[in-house]
Amino acid sequence: MAAQPKPLISANMVTTLRLLAMPLLAWLLYQGPNISGSKTLWWWSVGLGTIIGSTDFVDGMLARKYGPTVLGGMMDPLADKIFIALLYLPLMHLGLFPVWAVGLLFIREFLVTSIRSAYEWRGLQLKTSYFGKVKTWVQMQGIAILFLTVLVEKNTLVIYLAVLTGLPFLALVYFLVVKKKLSMNALLAVIFTGLTVALFTIPDSIFTSIDIGVYAICLLTWLSGLDYLLTAIPTLHKSGGFHRADVVRVGGAIVTPVCCVLALVHTTVAPAPMLIIFAGELAVGGLDNLLSRHKANSSTLSYGIRAYGSAGLLIAAIYAGDAAAILCWIAMAISLVGVISEFYRGRAHYLDDSKWDEVLVES
């Protein structure tokens, strides 16, 4: 059988372009700091976010056609997580999203990543539930709908949402009538958008609607993670108990998002250091999953210095007054140096030419 010709644009190229566009998306969000200001650049951010989100389908299609790679299998879900972070964190920082709900949402993401590393090191398989995949879809679609509530009038918003509900409904009918099968994604789209129409029709305040929406997304995110967390405790206990590395990583999974969020909302420092730390730690978490499978993950000491050192400096920045900025930038430097060194050290594993075998899957 003839080998598939190499595409002019590979799945990894698409994912890389998606990652490179994300800082611009975050910058655009910060150009509309209040609801009464100009919304032009926020509309640009909607357009760019839609393009970035759509490329997820493109790189997935290319990976299925030409075969996935280790690098692509690691990058794709990480790009999704970083994309979500660079949407939710700026909007939280600007006061549109409730702080504690966004913080809890990302604690869940970091915790599941740390548990996956513990599983991989032991040679265990952390099975991904369909609920986990739905969670990512809802996080992405939900923020788009929530953001529209700021950009359009309430009556117009209901029309937008009705159209958005109608399109997946037509897709659902197509799958049922033509394909003779049920499309779960189309069904979920109909249900989710239909509920959102009801949500934004009832409350009097736009911001009440936004808060309720973020709370619902946070609740769904944690419900999708409970099966991982509740299963992990007895499974790891049976596999030799908890190691020092497990405890340090789980602790880091809590302090990293918490300290980044607190530094964002309780200092006047530019958001770049916290966003870079957040994105870098999400990325290195996925790499840690891969390296754990090969028993090549970083030492507990180096992980602790990077994660707890940068987190401690962020907390110190909250009380440091005029020195807050320098502490945040030093925290970013510590995290960034650690992340880059980990990617350099583990390059032989993620640059492996062998096909991806689902070491890292969306959860």
Image: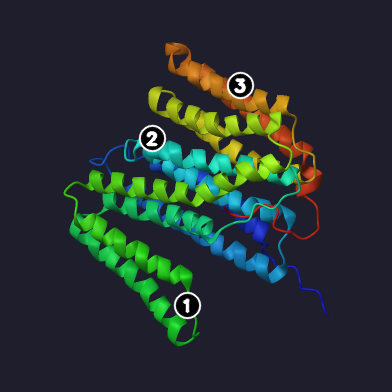
If the image is split into quadrants, where does the N terminus sit? bottom right
Where's residue 278, x and y in %?
54, 35
Q: What's the residue at 32%, 36% (across, down)?
A: 95
Q: What's the residue at 20%, 58% (across, down)?
A: 201
The residue singled out by tag 3 in the image is 309
Mark nearer the N terminus (2 vs 3)? 2
In the image, what residue type sits under mark 1?
Leu
Label 3 and label 1: CA atoms lie apart by 49 Å
Where's residue 155, x and y in %?
18, 60
In the image, what residue type sits under mark 3?
Gly
Q: For the residue carrying disc 3, how many other residues have a C-alpha within 10 Å: few (<14), some (14-19), or many (20+)?
A: some
Tell me the number on the disc at residue 182.
1
Where's residue 78, x and y in %?
60, 48
Q: Nearer the viewer, mark 2 or mark 3?
A: 2
The residue singled out by tag 2 in the image is 100
In the image, what residue type sits under mark 2?
Trp
Front-most of residues 14 and 355:
355
**Do the residues bearing badges 2 and 1 touch, measured as CB atoms within 8 Å?**
no
Q: Is residue 77 above or below residue 158?
A: above
